[in-house]
Image: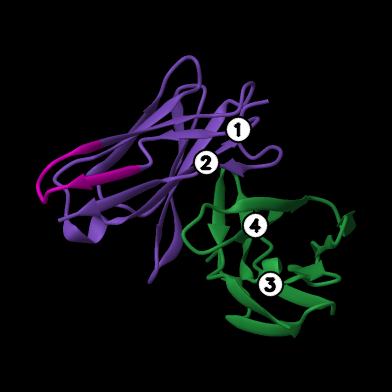
Amino acid sequence: GQNIDQPTEMTATEGAIVQINCTYQTSGFNGLFWYQQHAGEAPTFLSYNVLDGLEEKGRFSSFLSRSKGYSYLLLKELQMKDSASYLCAARWGGKLIFGQGTTLQVKP
Amino acid sequence: KAGVTQTPRYLIKTRGQQVTLSCSPISGHRSVSWYQQTPGQGLQFLFEYFSETQRNKGNFPGRFSGRQFSNSRSEMNVSTLELGDSALYLCASSPATGVGEAFFGQGTRLTVV
């Protein structure tokens, strides 16, 4: 199978750091994506990892370990507008398989 | 650079009808994939087109079909609509099959009544 697992919900405080984990099955995998989705809107691209390591983009960073089938999205200096669903997706060939998404609630 | 464009944004159809949705990828991108998003099932892969050929297909009935034109624009068709087809339909554009970043359009929200 090509299951993607990520936590359903997380809560964090404004200004804090939060890490959202994602695990996937490694066979045939060729890329890991993170998207942000606000309610009623389309997913917005955040990051794409193909090689092992950390990719940093401003307040957001994404990490990948191909051998472990593991990724995380790190959000720093949380803002209220970061309250959204965060989708992890692994690519096999030309298709993206998504996890169920992690709903992040940022509290004041 | 223009993003991924989907039309129409909203659509209301009656059971039994058919519908065609359109997706124009980012300029230079030749792979277009389609997804269905519902509250219960999340984002599910429908199919992917590259160079006018279907390269990958998800687990959806044959009522769901698509095609891609020589300019990389893609259409998705759903025939004999059912209430359960009500969903947000999203397309994503990539440079090629299995290569590079994938960006989504704004989606078409289909309501079947």
Q: Quadrant of residue A107?
A: bottom right
- Amino acid beneath label 1: Gly
Label 2 neighbour load within 10 Å: few <14, some 14-19, many 20+: many
Gap between marks 1 and 3, in whole Å?
29 Å
Tell me the mark number nearer the camera, choosing from 4 and 3: 4
User: What is the C-alpha distance between the residues marked 4 and 3?
Assistant: 15 Å
The reply to whether the magenta stretch includes residue B80 is no
Chain ID of residue with mark 2: B
Instruction: Please give the range of residues in magenta.
Output: B10-19
Kind of residue indicated by mark 3: Thr
**Element at label 4:** strand
Chain coloured green: A
Q: Residue at x 35, y 36 (%)?
A: B8
Q: Is residue B28 above or below residue A24?
A: above
Residue occupying the point 69% across, 63% down: A26
Disc 3 target residue? A23
Q: Which label number is shown at residue A35?
A: 4
- Residue on which disc 1 sits: B3
Q: Chain of mark 4?
A: A
- Same subunit, tags 2 and 1: yes
Q: Quadrant of the N terminus of chain B?
A: top right
Q: Residue furthest top?
A: B70
Q: Amino acid at mark 2?
A: Gly
Q: CA distance from mark 2 to mark 4?
A: 13 Å
Quadrant into which the C terminus of chain B falls? bottom left
Residue linked to disc 2: B105
Residue B106 in the image, given as x and y percentages of width and height: 49, 44
